Image (cartoon, rainbow, N blue to C red):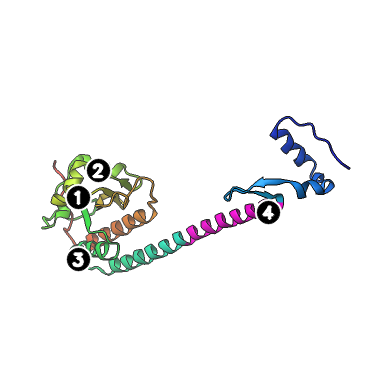
């Protein structure tokens, strides 16, 4: 049976075809005569060719998405292996000084992060204060300590507090992106800041899962080593 359509809008035509899926079966000659513009080559093609081209395009899109997932998985595997090596190293350190040097080494050699700044302050662990000759125990302002306390997740981006930027001394002017990681265990321990001269190394929308894990590992290691070393408590800030 031949059908005569009196439609006025593309939406009405589309709705009619959805409501009458047998239309093209009853009008097979129309299917053979229909021509559609080729999406790339600028020529007319049949409806069958157009459907095949649409399926090819969907397949190409799925392949690209699959490759993106594979690439992300491979990158995560690489980062996961590095995190594992760092975890093993942190468990093996016997002193806070050794751990601080080892952390700097692993971040530089394994993660290609040459710019690392760490600041620790008064903890809740028992023991007197000692004056350790290390920049990690330099005094910090109350503003920085409040900042660290209020952080729920690591911050990534181009802007940091001027005081934090000064921790990198002469290299500060070359740094374009930062990751600021709060160190917390049972108390607010300090801040770990890693930086890069590359603008896109640490950007605001990047995932912070591995940075959070890094902060947890470093915090646990610091707490463990302080408990093992009587009197090894960083100076409390007075500024």
The location of residue 190, given as percent across then percent down, is 24, 50
**Residue at the limit of the structure toward the top, as seen here:** 8
Q: Nearer the viewer, mark 1 or mark 2?
A: 1
Spatial separation of the CA atoms under disc 4 and disc 3: 68 Å
**Mark 4 — residue?**
49
The answer to which image quadrant residue 135 occupies is bottom left
The residue to which callout 1 is attached is 174
Q: Residues within 10 Å of mark 4 (few under 14, many from 20)?
A: some
Queried whether the magenta region covers residue 101, the answer comes back as: no
Range covered by the magenta-colored residues: 48-70
Q: CA distance from mark 2 to mark 4?
A: 56 Å
Between the C-alphas of marks 1 and 4, the distance is 56 Å
Residues at circles 2 and 3 in contact by the CB criterion of under 8 Å: no
Which mark sits nearer the N-terminus, 1 or 3? 3
Whole-percent x and y of residue 60? 56, 57
> Is residue 187 something that shows in the picture?
no
Sequence-wise, which precedes: disc 1 or disc 2? 2
Task: Read off the residue under disc 3.
Answer: 98
Where is mark 2, residue-wise?
A: 160
**In the image, is residue 211 above or below residue 155?**
below
Q: Is residue 90 left or right of residue 210?
A: left
Could you tell whether 40 is left or right of 175 in the image?
right
Distance between the Cα atoms at labels 1 and 2?
Answer: 14 Å
Residue in view at x 19 percent, y 41 percent: 162
Tell me where residue 24 appears, x and y as whole percent.
79, 46
């Amino acid at each position: 049976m031949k059908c005569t359509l009196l439609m006025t809008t593309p939406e009405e035509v589309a709705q009619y075809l959805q409501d009458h899926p047998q239309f093209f079966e009853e009008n097979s000659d129309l299917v053979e005569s229909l021509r559609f513009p080729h999406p790339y080559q600028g020529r007319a093609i049949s409806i069958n060719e157009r459907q095949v081209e649409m399926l090819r395009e969907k397949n190409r899109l799925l392949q690209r998405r699959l490759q993106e997932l594979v690439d992300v998985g491979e990158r995560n595997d690489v980062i996961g292996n590095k995190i594992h090596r760092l975890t093993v190293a942190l468990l093996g350190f016997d002193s806070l000084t050794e751990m601080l040097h080892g952390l700097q080494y692993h971040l530089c050699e394994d993660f290609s992060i040459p710019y690392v700044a760490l600041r620790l302050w008064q903890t809740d662990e028992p023991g007197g204060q000692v004056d350790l000759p290390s920049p990690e125990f330099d005094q910090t302002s109350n503003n920085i300590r409040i900042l660290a306390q209020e952080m729920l997740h690591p911050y990534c981006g181009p802007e940091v507090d001027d005081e934090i930027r000064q921790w990198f001394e002469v290299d500060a002017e070359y740094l374009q992106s930062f990751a600021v990681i709060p160190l917390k265990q049972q108390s607010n321990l300090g801040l770990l800041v890693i930086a890069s001269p590359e603008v896109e190394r640490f950007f605001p929308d990047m995932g912070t899962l591995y940075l959070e894990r890094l902060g947890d590992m470093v915090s646990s290691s610091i707490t463990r080593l302080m408990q093992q070393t009587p009197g090894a408590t960083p100076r409390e800030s007075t500024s």
